[in-house]
Amino acid sequence: RLVPAGLAAGVMLSLAILYLARLQMALPYAVKNALRRHELFLEYQPVVDLATGAWMGVEALVRWRRPTGEIVMPDLFIPIAEQNALIVRLTRQVLDRVCRDTGFYLEMHPDFHIGINVAPADFHSPGFVEHLEETLGRMGARPSNLILEVTERGLLDPVVARQTSGALRRLGFALAIDDFGTGYSSLSYLESLELDFLKIDRSFIEAIGTGAPTSQVVGHIIRMAKDLGLRMIAEGVESHAQADFLRAQGVQYGQGWLFGRPMSFVEVVRRMEEMARAQPLHATG
Ligand code: C2E
Ligand code: MG
Ligand code: MG
Ligand code: MG
C-alpha cells in the first residue's frame, strides 16, 4: 500500500517541478508581452516626515495586471526583467507612467518627491540620464522632484556609480541608496558617491526592540548615515514603537504600513488635500 502512495507523491512532485520549469521558461515571454501590452501600473506609498507626520513624497511601486485580472508583485517579475535584458524598457515605461500619473501634481508642488526604483542596467544604458531629463520636461517637473532609488548591488561598479551619481547630482536629481544594510558597501565607497538619502532596509526596522543582534545594527547604520551627512528613510515601519525609536535616533523619514500602504495616485492626491484642509499651512487668526 505504501508503494502506490509513494509513487503518487513522486508523480505529483515531478508534475509540480515540470510545471514550475515551464513557468520559468514562459515568464520572460510573459514579461515581454506585459511590456508590449502596457500591462504595468504603479502604486504609490507615502514617505512621511517622522517629526511632523507630513508626507514628503511617495515611492512609485510597479505592479503587473495580467489579462486574467491577477496582480503580480514586482519581486516576482523584476528579477526576470533584469535577467532578460528587459529592465531598461521596463524602467522607461515606469517613468512614462509616473509622468502621466503625477505630472500635473508635481508642476504645482515643487517640494513633493517621487521615489523611483532604478536597476543596475539603467545606469549602464546609454541615454538614461537624457531620457530622465526629457521625461521631466514633459511632466513640467523639476529634477529635485525625483529621488532615484538604487540598491547597493546597483552601485557595484565603482566607476559607473561615481560617474552616474555625479552626473545626476549636477542635474539636480536626488539619489538614494535602497535596502541599505543588505549589500556590501564599504564606508569609504559610500563616501565617494554623491548620495542624498539612505533607505534603511526593512529587516533592520523589524528587529527594533526585539533584542536580536540585528537590532544593534540599526544604531550603527544611523550613526554612519549621520556621519556621511545623508538623510534617512526607514523602510517597513509598522508600529508606533518603531517610529518612536527612529524619531528619537534622529531618523527624519519613515515609510511603512503604519503610515500607509501603496495606493493609486488619485488616492495620494485625495489624502494630501484632506491633510491640507485639516492643517492649513498658513493659518489665519
Ligand atoms: P523596495 O524598493 O525596497 O520597496 C519597498 C517594498 O516594501 C515594497 O514592496 C512595499 O510595498 C513594501 N513595504 C512597504 N512598507 C512595508 C511594511 O510596512 N511592511 C512590509 N512587510 N512591507 C512593506 P513591493 O511593492 O512588493 O516591491 C518590492 C521591490 O520590487 C521593491 O523594493 C523594489 O526593489 C522592486 N520594485 C518595485 N517597483 C519597481 C520599479 O518600478 N522598478 C524596479 N527596478 N524595481 C521595482
Ligand atoms: Mg525602493
Ligand atoms: Mg527599499
Ligand atoms: Mg526593501
Image (spheres, helix red, strand yellow):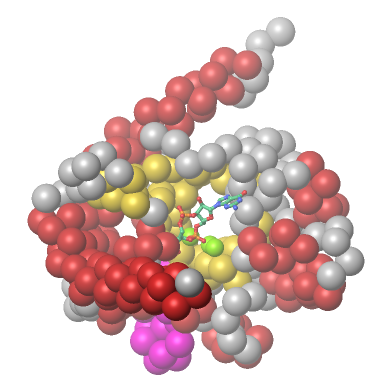
Highlighted range, magenta: 154-171
| Residue that appears at 54% across and 40% down | 261
| Residue that appears at 63% across and 38% down | 259
If the image is split into quadrants, where does the C terminus sit? top right
Q: Is residue 128 visible?
A: no
> Residue lying furthest right in this view?
211
Q: Position of residue 130 (x, y in %)?
A: 21, 66
Inspect the magenta stretch and tell me whether residue 170 lies in it.
yes
Residue 161 drawn above or below residue 128: below
Asked which quadrant contains residue 29, the reply is bottom left
Tell me the chief SS of the magenta region: helix
Q: Position of residue 243 (x, y in %)?
A: 76, 47
Residue 26 drawn above or below residue 40: below
Q: Position of residue 239 (x, y in %)?
A: 75, 44
Q: Is residue 270 visible?
A: yes
Q: Position of residue 153 (x, y in %)?
A: 47, 81
